[in-house]
């Protein structure tokens, strides 16, 4: 990259000017003088010299971003308050230059890296006309307004395509559509100079590697432009959802094609009942009891006997249902109905006998179904897979809620 040198008018230190013909100022890295290159090299402001390293990046570093090689030619640090040193809420903009692609910015904010460039396009609704979470459209993409704040220039060094002065004030408006951001900067809090920039979250590990930086801070877990990234949870949720759908389909198939064939039915009012039925020997035998229990109970002794008179099954089932009012509130417990599932006996003819013990006589409707396939296990699987499929969406929702909570808390303050 072409560069030329001048001497600082204040301290006479040699200064390399990088960034092409559109560079308007250079800030001396030795004395902090801001030199206006378009105004006879006049010193128009001065920054305190900051000795400590601002971040892993330095002037002159080169790296490839999105397939383009850039050089860091200038550094500008901002804060929401006027100060002489870098504070906990400061952020740093690195001016990048490419001979083929011009200027761009790499923003470093507490370990998060954002790549941005100026744009002449404007959104459908200006950002300074929006409130939190309101939407605007930019270049066909929807953005939500995130926050606005004051930004003071607290430090600068190197070559810049504008003149940065100490305590220059910008009103900044941010809208987000992760991993993209849209920013409006209004110079000196007036409608005098407005600039939009389009930004994109970059994985810090990739950028550090591109610039040859080995020792660097860990990237924070949360940032408004950082998309939620949990590949393991996402894979679990996607696969669980697939199995959830399969479980539902199996349940539907079972209910339509394997609900069983009714082989016997009857209604009885006495404590003795018997009926014959034919078993296919397949799957499950389902015995359904529907009673008229009303503040009453009954115990059913059910025997299944083969054609030779041999007892194959002996089953007991209690049915009870009570209800009433207490303290002005209605209550109920138990159920009037019951179902029993047993393995279908071998193919053949059988007799089902029922004897009933009860508090008071009641009516009972019996339905006997043969060849039933129970879907309960697939229902359990569907519930399990349904819960697992929500792991990623819930985690992502929680992540986004934390991002917006910070803005809402700032508004409350």
Image: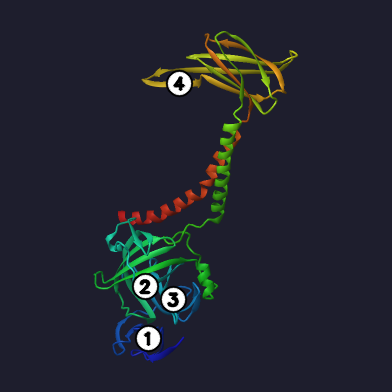
The residue shown at (45%, 75%) is 53
Q: CA distance from mark 3 to mark 2?
A: 29 Å
Residue 21, numbered label: 1
Q: Nearer the viewer, residue 312 or 333?
A: 312
Residue corresponding to mark 2: 118
Mark 1 vs 3, N-terminal side: 1
Q: Secondary structure at mark 2?
A: strand
> Residue 332's mark?
4
- Determine the CA span between mark 4 and mark 1: 86 Å
Residues under labels 2 and 4: Cα distance? 69 Å
Q: Position of residue 277 (x, y in %)?
A: 66, 17
Residue to which mark 3 is pinned: 52
Residue 33 location in percent, x, y?
A: 34, 84
Q: N-terminal of the two: label 4 or label 1?
A: 1
Quarter where residue 195 is shown = bottom left
Label 3: how many Cα within 10 Å (few below 14, some 14–19, many 20+) = few
Q: Nearer the viewer, mark 3 or mark 4?
A: 4
The numbered mark, 3 or 4, whose residue comes first in the sequence reads 3
- Give residue 173's position: percent from left, percent from top: 32, 64
Q: CA distance from mark 3 to mark 4?
A: 74 Å
Of marks 4 and 1, the one in the foreground: 1
Mark nearer the viewer, 3 or 2: 2
Quote the CA–CA distance across marks 1 and 2: 18 Å
Mark 2 vs 4, N-terminal side: 2
């Amino acid at each position: 990259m072409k560069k030329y040198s001048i001497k600082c008018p204040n301290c006479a230190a040699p200064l390399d000017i990088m960034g092409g013909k559109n560079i308007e100022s250079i800030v001396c890295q030795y004395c902090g003088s801001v030199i206006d290159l378009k105004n006879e090299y006049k010193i128009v402001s001065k920054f305190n010299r900051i000795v400590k390293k601002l971040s892993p990046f330095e002037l002159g570093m080169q790296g490839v971003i999105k397939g383009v090689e850039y050089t860091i030619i200038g550094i500008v640090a901002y804060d929401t308050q006027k100060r002489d040193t870098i504070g906990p809420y400061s952020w740093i903009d690195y001016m990048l230059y490419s001979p083929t692609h011009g200027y761009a910015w790499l923003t470093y904010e507490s370990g998060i890296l954002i790549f941005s460039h100026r744009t002449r396009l404007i959104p459908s609704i200006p950002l300074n006309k929006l409130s939190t979470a309101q939407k605007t459209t930019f270049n066909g993409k929807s953005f939500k307004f995130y926050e606005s704040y004051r930004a003071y220039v607290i430090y600068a060094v190197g070559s810049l395509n504008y003149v940065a002065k100490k305590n220059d004030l910008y009103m900044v408006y941010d809208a987000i559509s992760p991993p993209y951001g849209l920013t409006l900067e209004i110079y000196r809090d007036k409608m005098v100079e407005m600039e939009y920039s389009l930004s994109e979250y970059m994985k810090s590990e990739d950028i550090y590697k591109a610039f040859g930086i080995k020792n660097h801070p860990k990237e924070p877990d949360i940032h408004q432009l950082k998309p939620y990234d949990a590949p393991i949870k996402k894979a679990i949720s996607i696969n669980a959802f697939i199995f959830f759908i399969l479980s539902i389909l199996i349940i539907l198939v079972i209910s339509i094609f394997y609900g069983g064939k009714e082989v016997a039915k009857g209604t009885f009012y006495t404590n003795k009942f018997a009926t014959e039925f034919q078993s296919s020997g397949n799957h499950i035998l389902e015995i359904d009891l529907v009673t008229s229990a009303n503040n009453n109970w009954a115990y059913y002794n059910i025997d299944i006997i083969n054609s030779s008179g041999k007892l194959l099954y002996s089953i007991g089932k209690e049915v009870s249902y009570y209800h009433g009012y207490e303290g002005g509130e209605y209550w109920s417990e138990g159920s009037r109905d019951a179902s029993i599932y047993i393995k279908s006996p071998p193919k053949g003819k059988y007799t089902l006998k029922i004897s009933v013990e009860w508090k008071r006589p009641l009516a009972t409707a019996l339905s006997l179904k043969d060849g039933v396939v129970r879907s309960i296990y697939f229902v359990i699987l569907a519930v399990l897979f349904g819960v697992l499929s929500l792991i990623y969406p819930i985690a992502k929702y929680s992540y986004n809620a934390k991002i917006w909570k910070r803005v809402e808390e700032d508004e409350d303050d």
